[in-house]
């Protein structure tokens, strides 16, 4: 009898835990914000379909829903969807966190919402998250011609540490390797 009940009980507990955890996670991200932008929240567990929708709007070579579903099964993978209080998706950030390093895989802001500080908002929150996870450095590859992204990362003190020839194919081009060493409070 117990053997039949126990697994169902555990599954139910996990579902309840996941629902509660998701809600708390969203609230925590808002509470930590001292950024002048208001009424934003970061959804830490968007569906593959939701995040793919934003990716599609931001990138020339988007990842599809299957790509995201596979990535979401990897414990080190995270994808955040930035929303306003009307539940409208504004931007996204995907990254791989394997302490002591974190790699940014995708950062995009909805074309209608650019130049309003949203990418900076996401990266600021990424640093808050990274420090709690004992991450020592954040790094990424960016297309050499992506002036807006390069300017964004430079503004936030990411440094160029190298390049990769012919790294991108659409559009073709080299990648700059950028890295930011995080300063942790003593
Ligand atoms: C790059 C991108 C994420 C920037 O998002 P955003 O929300 O518009 O950026 P922010 O408003 O937070 O801008 C912060 C800083 O980034 C830089 N920046 C952003 N857009 C820029 C542009 N069009 N031209 C030059 N610099 C730009 C500036 O330094 C800016 O600071 P400032 O406002 O004090 O000048 C956005 O343009 C995008 O989604 N591009 C397509 C996807 C992409 O290329 N992602 C990067 C992959 S690594």
Image: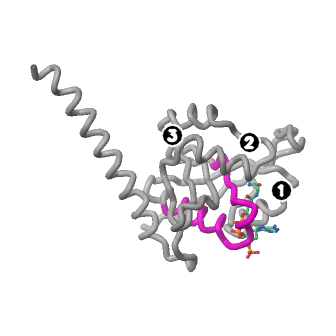
Is the image coloured rainbow, by chain, by secondary structure, or in one colour? one colour
Where residue 160 appears, as percent x and y from the top left, is 76, 56
Between 107 and 139, the one lying in front of the other is: 107
The circle drawn on residue 62 is 2
- Residue under label 3, please give it: 76
Residue at mark 3 to residue at mark 2: CA–CA distance: 21 Å
* Residue 47 located left or right of residue 28: right
In the figure, 84 relative to 168: above or below? below
Residue at mark 2 to residue at mark 1: CA–CA distance: 16 Å
In the figure, 34 relative to 181: above or below? below
Classify residue 68 by image quadrant.
top right
- x 48%, y 48%: residue: 45
Between disc 2 and disc 1, the foreground one is 2
- x 55%, y 59%: residue: 126
Q: Quadrant of ligand 1?
A: bottom right
- x 25%, y 37%: residue: 12
Where residue 17 appears, as percent x and y from the top left, is 29, 46
Q: Along the polypeptide, which appears first: circle 3 or circle 2? A: 2
- The part of the chain drawn in magenta is 104-128
Q: Along the polypeptide, which appears first: circle 1 or circle 3? A: 3
- Residue under label 1, please give it: 146
Image marks 1 and 3: residues in contact by CB distance under 8 Å: no
Q: Along the polypeptide, which appears first: circle 2 or circle 1? A: 2
Q: Secondary structure at mark 2?
A: loop
User: Label 3 neighbourhood size at 10 Å, few (<14), some (14-19), many (20+)?
Assistant: few
Q: Secondary structure at mark 3?
A: loop
User: Label 2 neighbourhood size at 10 Å, few (<14), some (14-19), many (20+)?
Assistant: some
In the figure, 93 relative to 16: above or below? below
Q: In the rendered structure, does residue 62 fall within the stretch colored magenta?
A: no
Is the residue marked 1 within 8 Å of ligand 1, measured from its CB? yes
């Amino acid at each position: 009898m117990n053997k039949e009940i126990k697994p169902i009980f555990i599954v139910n507990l996990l579902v309840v835990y996941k629902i509660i955890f998701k809600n708390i996670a969203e609230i925590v991200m808002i509470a930590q914000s001292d950024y002048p932008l208001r009424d934003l929240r970061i959804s830490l567990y968007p569906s593959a379909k939701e995040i793919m929708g934003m990716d599609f709007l931001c990138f020339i070579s988007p990842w599809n829903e299957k790509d995201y579903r596979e990535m979401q099964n990897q414990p080190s993978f995270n994808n955040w969807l930035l929303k306003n209080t009307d539940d409208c998706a504004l931007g996204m950030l995907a990254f791989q966190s394997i302490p002591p390093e974190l790699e940014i895989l995708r950062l995009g802001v909805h074309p209608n919402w650019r130049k309003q500080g949203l990418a900076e908002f996401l990266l600021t929150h990424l640093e808050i998250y990274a420090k709690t996870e004992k991450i020592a450095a954040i790094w990424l590859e960016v297309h050499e011609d992506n002036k807006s992204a390069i300017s964004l990362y430079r503004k936030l003190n990411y440094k160029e540490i190298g390049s990769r020839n012919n790294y991108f194919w659409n559009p073709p081009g080299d990648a700059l390797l950028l890295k930011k060493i995080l300063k942790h409070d003593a």
